[in-house]
Image: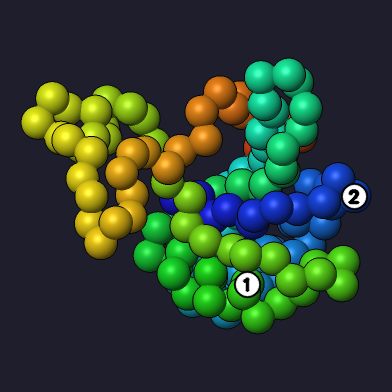
Amino acid sequence: MFVIIKKIPISITIEHIENFVSPIIKEEFLTKHGAVKAIQIIELIDKRGNSIERHGLVRVGPDSIVKQLIKSLNRCTMNNSRFIVDEYFNRHWRNERRATKSAQPTLINNKRKLDRRRLGLKKITIAEKLDFDTHSE
């Protein structure tokens, strides 16, 4: 399962994210054999090629530790800044209920007439580390 560290600055590297997540997994989840499996830094680019924002994606296992990990990471700082940490959902238009013919844009309390997604953004991978040691200590 993936955890996302939202809106990280350009100065944050894979090593910063690894140093942010790994100690918490080792300290708090030692009995559940939690491990970092992969880290990615992604960037959202608009149609003109301008960078909109950057995020860190961390794949951890097993899935049962994700909620506890998110709670623990939200109390910590990385490079003297606090970040929003949440569970990452990989969405696809085929899985959206609004993509079906039966789904109609609804008006609830004069809000949300149409979709809220930002259209035209492209996701690119800036940095990636996949070769973590998968052995438990």
Tell which of 82 and 115 is nearer to you.
Answer: 115
The residue tagged with tag 2: helix, strand or loop? loop
The residue singled out by tag 2 in the image is 11
Q: CA distance from mark 2 to mark 1?
A: 19 Å
Q: Quadrant of the C terminus?
A: bottom right
Q: Residues within 10 Å of mark 1 (few under 14, many from 20)?
A: many
Residue 84 disc label: none
Tell which of 121 and 6 is nearer to you.
Answer: 121
Res 92 quadrant in image: top left
Residue 40 higher or lower than 75, as above or below: above
Q: Please count the marks in the image.
A: 2
In this rendering, which labeled residue sits more in front, label 2 or label 1? 2
Residue under the point 23% across and 50% down: 107
Residue 110 pos. (x, y %)? 29, 56
The residue tagged with tag 1: helix, strand or loop? helix
- Horizontally, is 61 left or right of 57 in the view? left
Tell which of 98 and 43 is nearer to you.
Answer: 98
The residue singled out by tag 1 in the image is 73
Residue 64 higher or lower than 76, as above or below: above
Residue under the point 33% across and 55% down: 111
Which of the two labelled residues, at mark 2 and mark 1, occupies the earlier sequence position?
2
Question: Residue farthest to the front?
Answer: 110
Q: Are marks 2 and 1 in contact (CB under 8 Å)?
A: no
